[in-house]
Amino acid sequence: MKPLKLTMSAFGPYSGVQVIDFTELGDHTIFLINGPTGSGKTTILDGICFALYGDSSGAERNGKSMRSQFASDEQATEVIFEFELKDEK
């Protein structure tokens, strides 16, 4: 599986919409998710797992509890993960 784009809305610490465009990596097959403690690295992995399986990546976090506490009541919590598998999107 090759990740293409992850879009998260009102998910984890992100109150707004966050888009991670993995296509910007080009043909690189390895990449690093790097940042200080609390910067949202695990939330990226949680978002991917939530989109695929409806649950977070860790046993400590429940998928249903991943809604951002900073989001307005009107904003929907949504995660969209686009990926390629065997040359199909």
Image: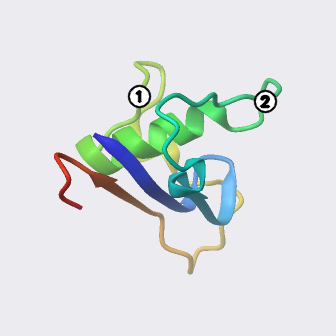
**Horizontal and vertical percent position of residue 72:** 66, 73
Q: Is residue 32 above or below residue 4?
A: above
At a point 77% along the width and 36% down the height, the residue shown is 39
Dot 1 falls on a residue whose secondary structure is: loop
At a point 56% along the width and 76% down the height, the residue shown is 75
Q: Looking at the picture, tell me which residue is in the foreground, 88 or 73.
A: 88
- Whether the residues at callouts 2 and 1 have beta carbons within 8 Å, the answer is no
Q: Looking at the picture, tell me which residue is in the foreground, 61 or 53.
A: 53
Q: What residue type is labelled 2?
A: Gly
Asked where in the image residue 31 lies, by quadrant, the reply is top right
Q: Which amino acid does label 1 sit on?
A: Ser
Residue 40 numbered tag: none
The answer to whether residue 42 is left or right of residue 89 is right
Q: Which residue lies furthest to the right in this view?
A: 36
Query: Dot 2 corresponds to which residue?
Result: 35
Dot 2 falls on a residue whose secondary structure is: loop
Q: Which residue lies furthest to the front in this view?
A: 27
The answer to whether residue 88 is left or right of residue 84 is left
Within 10 Å of disc 1 (Cα), the crowding (few <14, some 14-19, many 20+) is: some
**Horizontal and vertical percent position of residue 4:** 42, 55
Q: Looking at the picture, tell me which residue is in the foreground, 68 or 9.
A: 9
